[in-house]
Amino acid sequence: MAGRWSRDGAVQDQIDASIEDAVKQARSQLPKGAGLSHCEECDVEIPQARRDAVPSARLCVTCQELVNETQKTSGGINRRGSKDSQLR
Ligand SMILES: [Zn+2]
């Protein structure tokens, strides 16, 4: 049934949209270009050496690598899903 398909899709779109909104809102509250002392994703302290090397770093090395991987493989819906479940 076509109606059932589009309803499921709409729910998923809504979930995706609210995650994106939350991320955008969180990011917009941070000064652009400023680094953080603790990882934006997992709240681990970002080592001073990393902050010296990357003054705008807002993620620990682990999370930054996850982001890099996601960007590299773009279209990694499964990856994004598993990353979200790690956060819970
Ligand atoms: Zn992290």
Image (spheres, helix red, strand yellow):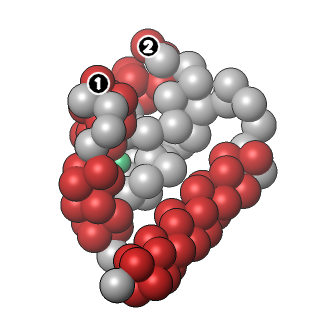
Closer to the camera in the image, 30 or 77 = 77
Please indicate whether residue 66 sits to the left or right of residue 50 in the image: left
| Residue 50 seen in the figure | yes
Q: Which disc, if any, is residue 53?
A: 2
Residue 8 drawn above or below residue 55: below
Position of residue 23 measured from the top left corner of the image (x, y, whole percent): 60, 55
Identity of the residue drawn at 59% across and 63% down: 17
Identity of the residue drawn at 43% across and 28% down: 48
Residue type at mark 2 is Ala
Q: Which residue appears farthest toward the top when viewing the image?
A: 53
Quarter of the image for residue 73 reads: top left
Q: Secondary structure at mark 1?
A: helix
Position of residue 79 measured from the top left corner of the image (x, y, whole percent): 23, 50
Identity of the residue drawn at 40% across and 78% down: 2
Task: Using a 10 Å C-alpha cutoff, classify the residue at mark 1 as few (fewer than 14 neighbours), some (14 to 19) or many (20 or more).
Answer: few
Q: Quadrant of the N terminus?
A: bottom left
Q: Which disc, if any, is residue 23?
A: none
Please tell me which of labels 1 and 2 falls first in the chain: 2
Residue that mark 1 sits on: 72
Residue 26 drawn above or below residue 88: above
The Cα atoms of the two marked residues, 1 and 2, are separated by: 22 Å
Position of residue 86 measured from the top left corner of the image (x, y, whole percent): 26, 66
Task: Using a 10 Å C-alpha cutoff, classify the residue at mark 2 as few (fewer than 14 neighbours), some (14 to 19) or many (20 or more).
Answer: few
Please indicate whether residue 2 sits to the left or right of residue 14 in the image: left
Closer to the camera in the image, 15 or 69 = 15
Quarter of the image for residue 82 reads: bottom left
Position of residue 25 measured from the top left corner of the image (x, y, whole percent): 72, 56
| Residue 65 seen in the figure | no
Identity of the residue drawn at 67% across and 29% down: 34
Residue 2 drawn above or below residue 26: below
